[in-house]
Image: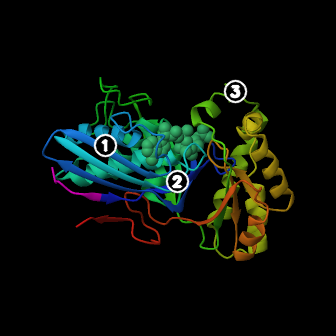
Amino acid sequence: MRPGPVTVRPPATSANLGPGFDAFGLALELRDEVVVEALPEPGLTVEVFGEGAGDVPLDERHLLVRALRAGFDALGGQPAGLRVTCRNRIPHGRGLGSSSAAICAGLTAARDLADGGALVLDDDALLDLANRIEGHPDNVAPALRGGLTIAWTQQDPDGPRRAGAPQKPDPAGHTVRQPEHMRAFALRLDPVPQVAAVAFVPPNRLATEVARGLLPDMVPHRDAAFNAGRAALLTAALTAPGLSAHHRAELLHAGTRDRLHQGYRAAAMPDSAALIRRLRAEGFAAFVSGAGPTVLALTVGPEWEQKAVGYAPPDWDVMVLTVAGAGTAGGAGPVSGAVRADTP
Ligand SMILES: Nc1ncnc2c1ncn2[C@@H]1O[C@H](COP(=O)(O)OP(=O)(O)OP(=O)(O)O)[C@@H](O)[C@H]1O
Ligand SMILES: N[C@@H](CCO)C(=O)O
């Protein structure tokens, strides 16, 4: 075990993007910064500045600490002591992937501190472990890899006893929600550089668990077929080169329609639903970010960004965010800003 400290900077993420429920995710250039140090003496110190300060627990229940513990378990052992410092910018419980950022930061820091960590927990195993803690892969995939990701789970080709993944919940309460025999995968794509996002963040929170509880067990076949087509269209609208801005904006608008989750959740976020209606009526590709209540509008240039910002309700935060080319664990795309650096 290296003492560190190591610094990791996980990006915010927006999941679903309209039709890609539990599959699509986009990494956004808004990052938390986490410093983790392994100490020779027993004990745990957690400091939180910014988002979540005074709110999240500062002990073993802290989500990032739980991810660190799960990471160290998978890597073969816990350090004697830990010091964790979080400088958070991603708002909590708003649909911008704060919980995934914490999980991915914890796992990546554990891997960076462990001797030979990347050999034991490679990028695929890291994604799978992150998904086991989060419960769905669409935020953790872009949080780890950056860019636009399409995530899915399928039967583990190596069987349920593959090394590096926890087999069951342990007494310390490290959550393992995904069935053991299922494994998470993700494909990373690069949106064209013109695409950015305007995030409208309301003052109120909506917990993902609550929003998931509003979804029905069954949906009409025609709605499933509708979303499948729009999801395919959105992938092309985000990545196909050579489209005019006007044509791309039209395709993004059509490609961000959804019938599988937003309608069922609208009553829990009526202001978000109203803002989406206004933005879409003006041609913006607007949708609920993740489980909400943040509204995201995909844009195709500075004029669109500036116009969209004007729709922000008075007491909401509004941010123009570029796509993050690099995730917590690196990424193949263009990097805006340092992603990870060992603190001297
Ligand atoms: N950086 C963090 N450190 C510790 N706990 C966190 C952190 N970020 C999120 N959490 C925990 O996760 C909760 C928010 O998770 P939740 O999944 O409801 O929202 P989200 O991740 O912000 O949104 P979404 O999953 O829809 O994108 C917080 O209330 C807090 O308990
Ligand atoms: N796909 C998840 C994302 C949560 O961030 C949901 O909408 O519940």
Which amino acid type is marked by label 2? Ile
**Residue at the spot 73% in from the left edge and 61% down from the top edge:** 252
Q: Is residue 3 above or below residue 304?
A: above
* Pointer 2 with pointer 1, Cβ within 8 A: no
Could you tell me what secondary structure mostly forms the magenta stretch? loop
Image quarter hosting the C terminus = bottom left
Which amino acid type is marked by label 3? Pro
**Residue at the spot 24% in from the left edge and 37% down from the top edge:** 73
Quarter of the image where one finds residue 61: top left
Span colored in magenta: 1-6
Q: Label 1 belongs to which residue?
A: 68
Q: Is residue 125 above or below residue 244?
A: above
On screen, residue 134 versus residue 230, left or right, reads left
Name the outermost residue toward the front: 54
Name the outermost residue toward the left: 40
Q: Label 3 belongs to which residue?
A: 216
Q: Is residue 33 above or below residue 54?
A: below
Label 3 Cα neighbours within 10 Å, binned few <14 / some 14-19 / many ≥20: few
Residue 90's mark?
2
Residue 168 image point, x, y percent: 33, 25
Q: Of the residues under marks 2 and 1, which one precedes in the sequence?
A: 1
Residue 28 image point, x, y percent: 55, 61
Label 1 Cα neighbours within 10 Å, binned few <14 / some 14-19 / many ≥20: many
Q: Of the residues under marks 2 and 3, which one precedes in the sequence?
A: 2
